[in-house]
Amino acid sequence: MRSFKFFALVATLIATTTAIPIDRGYDSELVARDVGDIDARDVLNDAQAPLFSRDVESDFESIDARGLTDADELDAREFDDLLELEGRDLSDLAYEDDLFARAARTSKVNNVIKAQGQKQEKAQKKANANNKTAEKAAGKANAATPKPAKPADPKDPKQVAAYKKAGDDRKKAATKAGSQAVTQAVKDKKTQRTEKWASKPKGPATGPKPQGPARTKDQKAADRATKQADRKATGQHLKEAGKVTKNTEGLPGRKDSYTVAADNGKGTKQVSGKDVRKAVFNSNANQKYPVGQPGKEQPKTFNNDPYSPKHPDPKLAGKPTIPGLPPKKGVEYPVLSGSKSGWTGDQNPGSARVITQKGGPGQPDKLNGVIAHDPSKKGDSSDHYLVQKNAKK
């Protein structure tokens, strides 16, 4: 009886100190459209719209209404926005710090970023496959329907109108055929998956699993309160990282690009402004508890060491990588090309890095630039060089 009262007292204290308003619609996966995409229209505030919760398969099944013929539109709708978090009010700053540390300690922040990248990649893969199916079906429909003959008299309004209507009807028929093909493909895939699972041999009956000691109602309530607090802490952590990133000076536009050396040292590759913004966001999100292999965690301090006095380029010899940045005042983080989640600690980081500098009290952070290896400079193989944005076409 004493043990039960003790647990009840502990649960009451936990519930009292951790009880905060919880949005039941908020999912710990924090469905982010694009955690690295931040600009003036991605305003994080306490009156944000609900989190994206559409089911991608249902979108494809309703393709008759949308067409899904424009991949850019799909990308803009589902993958081109900043992580949208519903507003949360943590008036107790000490409690907020505790939640922040707890979220970071349990690696929930980085796991959320990974999950969102995987979810977006999966959705993009589905979209690409469905667009391919739609285009193939539309092509067949067009091939089966000959192009309408041009009007014999181009000045006759009736003939011109009939010619235009025939062309529009042909286009609509092709679009409808593509939509129906995608819908049928989704249904066929579901049927195949169901049949596959049904055909799998069932193992011997093992009976009910052994149950552990039953938890009391108070213990369950305490566990729920802890999970909800962790979930809210993760959301607050990402929301704050988003605010810091949004206010960072020097962020490139999403469609800006940089040309950096390929990771194998042969040729070059493109890094987009979106990739850079994502890296800055991830750097802020993982600032307190860096991620990666032991001894190689990121983000980390950027020393901004000077090049060798014997560097082949006299303009660089003895000069720091980033002019004007004091030694060991920068923060570096890997930037990946075309990744939905950005670098999360378990990929090859490559040589490209974003370099940021923390602002003083009340001052915004600053993006000092993008750096990468450049074999053409003929310096040391470990040297990094400041990369300039490509000129806009």
Image (cartoon, rainbow, N blue to C red):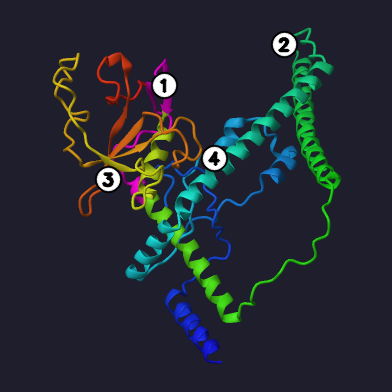
Q: Is residue 266 magenta?
A: yes
Quadrant of the image occupied by residue 390: top left
Q: Is residue 158 magenta?
A: no
Give the residue pinned by disc 3.
365
Give the residue pinned by disc 2.
155
Marker disc for residue 42: none
Q: Nearer the viewer, mark 1 or mark 3?
A: 1
Magenta-drawn segment: 243-271
Q: CA distance from mark 4 to mark 3?
A: 26 Å
Can residue 78 be seen?
no
Q: How dense is the environment of label 3, judged by Cα within 10 Å: few (below 14), some, or many (20 and up)? A: some
Q: CA distance from mark 4 to mark 2?
A: 47 Å
Q: How dense is the environment of label 2, judged by Cα within 10 Å: few (below 14), some, or many (20 and up)? A: few
The answer to which of marks 4 and 1 sits earlier in the sequence is: 4
Q: Where does the image place residue 83, in percent across and percent down from the top left?
A: 48, 48
Left or right? Give the position of 117 relative to 316. Answer: right
Q: Where does the image place residue 386, in percent across and percent down from the top left?
A: 27, 26
Q: Residue at x 70, y 43 (%)?
A: 57
